[in-house]
Image (spheres, rainbow, N blue to C red):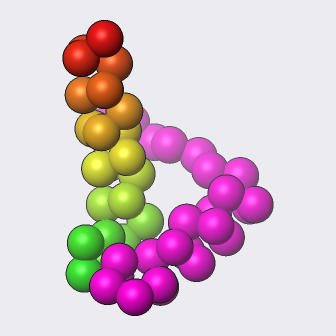
Amino acid sequence: MAVIKIDDKLLKEVKRFIREDDNRFDYPTIKSFVDKAVYVYLKKRQEK
């Protein structure tokens, strides 16, 4: 498994996003957010 490093500014934005409304249920951890974000990005690239 790879290690992904996030700069401080992006990390703060991700944490803030996760705390909003019901996002904490969809993304319980920063890792789950990054995993889903990468998955969505790759799916969109495949559709092109």
As drawn, 35 above or below 24: above
Q: Quadrant of residue 13?
A: bottom right
**Most extreme residue toward the top, as rendered?**
48
User: Quarter-wise, where is residue 28 in the image?
Assistant: bottom left
Q: Position of residue 6 (x, y in %)?
A: 62, 50
Residue shown at 31% from the left, 48% from the top: 35
Q: In the image, is residue 14 above or below residue 47?
A: below
User: Seen in the image, is 47 located left or right of residue 38?
Assistant: left
The answer to whether residue 35 is magenta is no
The number of numbered badges drawn on the structure is 0
Residue at (25, 15) in percent of width and height: 46
Residue 10 location (% of width, % of height): 67, 57
How far across and how far down the image is residue 44, in percent? 31, 26
Q: Residue 37: x and y, percent?
A: 37, 46
Identify the residue at horizontal 37%, vertical 59% (top origin).
Answer: 33
List the single residue furthest toward the right: 9
- Closest to the observer, 21 or 3: 21
Residue 18 falls within the magenta-colored stretch: yes
Seen as rendered, the residue at the extreme front is: 48
> Hey, which quadrant is residue 24 in on the image?
bottom left
Give the residues in magenta.
1-24
Residue nearer the viewer, 1 or 42: 42
- Quarter of the N terminus within the rendering: top left
The quarter of the picture where the C terminus appears is: top left
Relative to 22, say whether 18 is above or below.
Answer: above
